[in-house]
Every structure is written in C-alpha cells, then in structure tokens.
Image: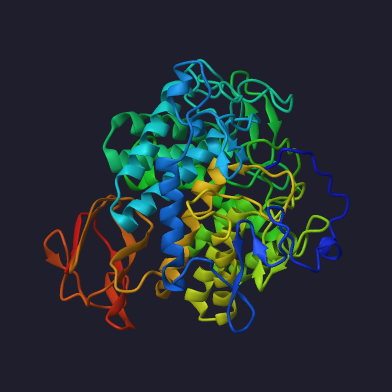
Amino acid sequence: MRKTILLVISCFTATALCAQQPSNRYSDKPDSIATHKVVLDDQSKLISWIQPQSRAYDVFLRQRWNFIKTAVPYSPGPAPRSQYPQYYFYCAYKVSNGKIMQEPDAWMNDIGEKIPNWFESARLYYAYTGDTTVMTIVEKLAEYAIDHGVTPGTFAWPNFPYTTTNPGDMEFKGFDAAKRFVLHEVQVDHAGDIGLAFYRLYLYTGKEKFKKAAIGIANTLADKAKTGDAEKSVWPYRVVMNTGEVTAPYGTNWIGAYSLLEHLVNAKTGNVRAYQNAMNKVRDFMLRFPVQTGYWADGHTDTDVKSNTYKSNMGKSNVALYILDNPSFDPEWKTHIPQMIQWTETNFVTRCNEGEPATQWGANLVGEQDDFLPKMDYQTARYAAECAKWFAVTGDTTYREKAYRSLNWVTYCSDSIGMAFESPVSDGVSSWWSDCYGEGPRMFYHALAAIPEWAPPRENHILYSRSVLKNVEYDVNKVQYTTTDETGKEFLKLAFKPAKISLNGKSVPLQSSNNGYSIRSLGKGDYAVTINRKNSGRVVIE
C-alpha cells in the first residue's frame, strides 16, 4: 500500500465520491498535472506534454532510467550503508524544492516488489536500446539480496528470499517496525516473483549463483504447494519462515511463481515433476477461483490483508498480461480478458477517494486496492498495457483510445528530468522506487509491441520480447540479438524493410504461422516485424 498517512475508505460505491473537476496535489493550476501544463488535442483530450508526440513514450522511458543513473542520493550513513543508493534500503523518497532529499522515506524496504519490477523494466529497456548499464544496476541489486536476504536451510521455509525488511537494514530480516508483521514474515507471492527474476538474471549473465538461488526458491514452492480452494490458495499469501506459521492463507498473485516453475520445467532443470505438479495446482486454482469470483487478493508488501474477498488490481493485471502472452493458459481467454479489463474499470477507475477524479481529460486513472484507492501512475500504466494488447487482438479501437489517453497521463507523472510523482491527484502518497521506476515503465513495452506506431519513427527498436535477450546490437540497417528461451516471440519496429532474417545462420521464413516472421508496413519507410521462434540462438535481421 503506497501511503504515508492512514486512509479509511468507508464506502465502496465510490463513483459519487469522484471529483467532477480535475485534481492536482502538486499545483494549484486547474489545467496542470504535477509540474506540467496539460496539452490537449482537437478533441480536448490529453496528449503527452513531451513533444513531439511521436517520441513521447521513448523520451519518458529514457528520462526515468537516466534519473536512476544520475540523480539518486546515497543512503544516509554510517558506512557502508552510505556507499549504496537509497533504493537499496528504502521503499520511497522525499522531495523538497524539486529534488530528492538526502533523508529517505522511512516506512520500509519492499525488496519483493523492487527486484522483480526493476529487472523486467531493465531487461526490456536493454532490448529496446542496447544499453547494458541498466542490467548492471539490477544485477548488483539482486546479488545484494541473495547475499543478505535468503533464509538458511534450517528454516521451515528454507532457501527462501525476504520480501520486506525494516528501513535502512543492511541485513534483511523482515518488516516489523510498524507492528503489522513479525520478523521473518514474508509474502510468498513476491518471493516467487524474486525467484523468477533470479532465474532470468541467470539466463542473461550465466552466473550460477542466480540459478542456484532460483532453484532453492522453486524447490520450497514445490514442496509447500497444496490444492487451492475459495478460502486457501495453493500457497499461503503470508508465512513466518522460521516457524512455518501461516498468517494469511489466501492470495492470488501467483503468476510469477508459476512462471519460475515453468522456466525450470522447460529447461529440464531441478525437480521437474514436482514443479509441474505445482504448476497444475496454480493453473487450476486461478481459473476456478479468482478468474471466476473476481477476488484478486494481494495486499502488496506493507498491507496486512487476511481476506479471501479482498480486491487488488496488481494480481489481476499480472495474470491478464500473462494470458495475453500465453493464451493456452486459459481456454476461455477471449471471454475473460475483456471481463478483467472491465473489472479494473469498475473497481479501480470509477471508485475513488473523495475529491479525486476517475478521469482527467479523457484518461482513465487507476487505483491500487480496496483499502487504498488513490490513483497511481503505475496502476494506470498496467491498465493501459492490457487495453493496448487487447486492441492488438481484437482491433477494437475503443481499447486503443483507452490505452493512449492513460499512457499520456502517466507521462505527466515525471518532471523534465525523470523524477517521478506517483500519484499527482492524491495527498499523502509517497513515490516508491519499485512502482515508479520498475512497475510503471515496464508496461510501456507491452503497449509499444501492440501498437508499434507509438514508437519513434525512423528508428530501430526491439519493442517487447517474452524471452530474456542478450548481446543486443543495433546498426543502421541491421539488428542482432541472442535469445535464451527455446521458443519465443519478439516484436520490433524497424526503419528498414528486412531482406533477410536468420536464426543461427539459417533463414527464417516469411509467413504468419507460429514459425517464421511477419511484416507490416507502417508507412514512410517504417515496418513492424514480429518473429515467432521454435529454437533459441542468434537472430540477425538485415
């Protein structure tokens, strides 16, 4: 829950609570969002403040990473803590006079959200730009978590990562400072997300320590998996790792844990039979319960949720995005995906905190969870990504319009150098490193893949890939990369029409089936290219 003050929501039929006029906590100007005057099109609807509009999303993504590289203060002392950037040990930052303060937000450290989201943001940005520095940043952050935040083999939940810790802690032991949790208490879903990030870092770096840590997490998950029902999920949402005490039996944010096991099964690594058995339990639980009931219960890393009827947008969004990439997960996906998008609109767009807007200049704004409804940049980006991908499936321009306006709104949640404002229309909400610099930006790549026209003209970019890519190289008339998964799909926008695409030196056929590549002219010399692979290796497009 992203907050620095307690908010009590007493009524969940909150459409009437939504403000009729735009709200802005950072400015008293009614035609501004955060630090920017709004820019409208000829329909009086929101476009990005970043001009030209054709480069808006590209500039937004670059500014956010550039801010991480150049503008983050170090942690307060003593040494050695003062030798690490603030995001190592704190969840959020404070702002004064337009700059991040040396004193960080002292609420917690949300390791379990930060590492997975930063990894996804980094690996997609690296594929998009070829910039390896962002992968180095995330690699070091993840290595620190392995060295300072994994349980010993003697615990009831052994070799399992801490998902939270107290602010400033250099050794991760859990977040008990606010008296909501006890030491060694962990959110199991976020631990699964960390495991997936560790394994995918192994695919990128080849470092065995990442593989070993990921397998340790997978083994514990497989050992603890149970058949889920309406009151208890496959794994408990929260557990005290040293004793095994379950403190919250129901959660639904399991797609990261599922994907970790899936990667290991596909690679025939570890206890494959046990992993497959746990995967079957997860898939059955997800399709029988939250997909049907709408009770997507997860409370994020700082929320003491103990309910099987709680609703949070994050878990639902993770599943929707996974299904859109992997439709075989859900035989009824074409029915469920629009229902899931509507679920977000009903629960987290039209429901608002008193005085806050549901929309601004045509852009739907999205809240986070039942007990925390402020409109958030990263949740709005999640919604936009789902809408864009559904447009790519259906061609329904209603969803393209929703995605476009909401992504435009998210660009206003940065100043001109990339410092983020997580919730410009809400009071008392801190800007979290995990949300603003991981979870929000990574959603843009889903949207760019779905609608490549939104990527910059006359440039070459890998817009999105399901797989981890490495050895990415860009030339004027050539793009190369190495894949790490046996099968995969890459989406590109190119400033040239490919004459040849090869995989490991062999030509890839031009076709629209599941083995080959397709090409679509975008006009003015630009092309959208989609590559479906049945093998891994070196891809060359020239």
The x and y percentages for residue 194 are 48, 37
| Quarter in which the N terminus is drawn | top right
Q: Can the viewer see residue 279?
A: no
Q: How many tags in the picture?
A: 0
Q: Residue most toward the left?
A: 505
Residue drawn at (82%, 65%) of the image = 15
Structure colour scheme: rainbow
Compare residues 215 and 444 and report the one nearer the observer: 444
The x and y percentages for residue 271 are 39, 35
Eyeballing the image, is 33 above or below 119? below
The x and y percentages for residue 451 are 44, 73
Residue drawn at (42%, 60%) of the image = 59
| Quarter in which the C terminus is drawn | bottom left
Compare residues 332 and 465 and report the one nearer the observer: 465
Dividing the picture into quadrants, the one containing residue 234 is top right
Eyeballing the image, is 368 above or below 524? above
Q: Can the viewer see residue 176?
A: yes
The x and y percentages for residue 521 are 31, 82
As drawn, is 303 to the left or to the right of 19? left
Q: Residue most toward the right?
A: 10
Eyeballing the image, is 397 above or below 408? below
Dividing the picture into quadrants, the one containing residue 124 is bottom left
As drawn, is 333 to the left or to the right of 293? left
As drawn, is 248 to the left or to the right of 209? right
Dividing the picture into quadrants, the one containing residue 206 is top left
Compare residues 323 and 3 and report the one nearer the observer: 3
Compare residues 221 and 23 and report the one nearer the observer: 23
